[in-house]
Image (tube, rainbow, N blue to C red):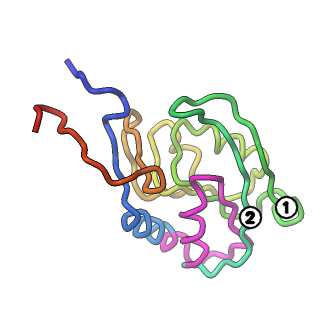
Amino acid sequence: MNDRLPHEKGFHVSWDQMHRDARALAWRLDGRDWKAVLAITRGGLVPAMIVARELDIRTIDTISVKSYHKQEQGGITVLKAPDPQVMGDGTGILVVDDLVDSGRTLEHVRSLYPKAHFVTVYAKPKGKPMVQDYVTEVSQDTWIFFPWDMALQYVQPYRGED
């Protein structure tokens, strides 16, 4: 029997690892003519900045989409939309997020910008069909702990007292 809570099957990403993985994502996207980067906030901000820097893309905008409350997925709400003149139908737009989980958020954004190119740093199996490129796949039941969500502290071992 597994007595761990669901969030205890965690994949911990450090700042260094995020930087390396976002650069690896940029390398896969090099050689194409990108008009702009669209970061899905909040998680897509850091990888979008790294990708834009690596690919020398100066036009960056954001779309703020809320689909989680704590660790539970809920309804999708667009809180802030990007500049429609830049976005058009998404042609030449690189949409960047940190993670695709169920794919619901990216599915919604894709409905707004159907010709955009969607990428994430990390992907879970259910969401993989929503992205054209990603760096690392994790299992569907893994919770990814991003560096902006973490603080250094003691962690008790999975088994035993110490």
The residue closer to the viewer here, 135 or 59, is 59
Does the magenta run of residues contain 5?
no
The spot of residue 97 in percent (x, y) is 58, 54
Most extreme residue toward the top is 1
For the N terminus, the quadrant is top left
Residue at image position (66%, 77%) is 57
The spot of residue 16 in percent (x, y) is 37, 68
The answer to whether the residue labelled 2 contacts the one labelled 1, judged by CB atoms less than 8 Å apart, is: yes
Residue 38, compared with residue 29, is above or below; it is above
The residue closer to the viewer here, 57 or 62, is 62
What is the magenta range?
A: 26-53
Count how many numbered circles sit on residues in the image.
Answer: 2
Which one is earlier in the sequence, the residue at label 2 or at label 1? 2
Residue at image position (41%, 47%) is 145
Residue type at numbered disc 2:
Asp
Assign a secondary structure to mark 2.
strand
Residue 54 placement: quadrant: bottom right
Kindly identify which residue carries mark 1.
83
Residue 118, compared with residue 124, is above or below; it is below
Residue at image position (73%, 53%) is 63
Q: Residues within 10 Å of mark 1 (few under 14, many from 20)?
A: few
Does the magenta run of residues contain 32?
yes
Residue type at numbered disc 1:
Asp
The residue closer to the viewer here, 131 or 49, is 49
Assign a secondary structure to mark 1.
loop
Q: Is residue 161 left or right of residue 14?
A: left
Q: Residues within 10 Å of mark 2 (few under 14, many from 20)?
A: some
Kindly identify which residue carries mark 2.
61
* CA gap, disc 2 and disc 1: 7 Å
